[in-house]
Amino acid sequence: MIHLLKAEVQQIKITGRKVEYEESLTLDREMMKELGVMEYEQVRVNSKYSKGRIITYLLEGEKGLCELNGGAAQHFRTGEVVHLLFYGIVPFYKKPIVL
């Protein structure tokens, strides 16, 4: 089994932060549908301009939302540009190389 990038959002702005909430990322449900990702799926959030990088999970949200919640909200600012990365685990078979 190998991990492969299955979907990516290269640049999206954080629209809000809810510190007093369970740790997660609330994302526009239509965008989730287009990306082929689902609620509670793991997402990696990487800042475009700083060293901020976290792994959290998705919750469905209203149109236009990209909102960090709980401890995840401590790592980024509202308006910060981030990349969202979604990985899948797929079977991988390669014929062994014999030297």
Image: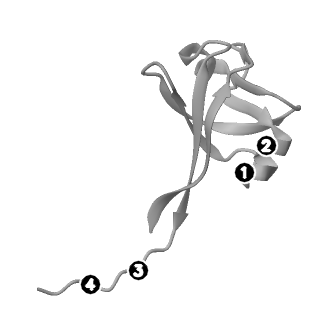
Which residue is identified by label 2? 31
Question: Percent x, y for residue 74?
Answer: 57, 14
Answer with mark 1 or mark 3, whichever residue precedes in sequence. Answer: 1
Measured Cα–Cα span from mark 1 to mark 2: 6 Å
User: Total label count?
Assistant: 4
Q: Residues within 10 Å of mark 2 (few under 14, many from 20)?
A: some
Judge depth for marks 2 and 3 and give the one in front: 2
Answer with mark 4 or mark 2, whichever residue precedes in sequence. Answer: 2
Residue kind at label 3, given as amino acid type: Tyr
Measured Cα–Cα span from mark 4 to mark 3: 9 Å
Q: Secondary structure at mark 4?
A: loop
Judge depth for marks 4 and 1 and give the one in front: 1
Residue kind at label 1, given as amino acid type: Leu
Q: Quadrant of residue 14?
A: top right
What number is the disc on residue 15?
none
Label pair 4/2, CB-CB below 8 angstroms: no
Q: Quadrant of residue 67?
A: top right
Q: Depth check: give the residue in front, 65 or 48.
A: 48
Measured Cα–Cα span from mark 1 to mark 3: 26 Å
Label pair 1/2, CB-CB below 8 angstroms: yes
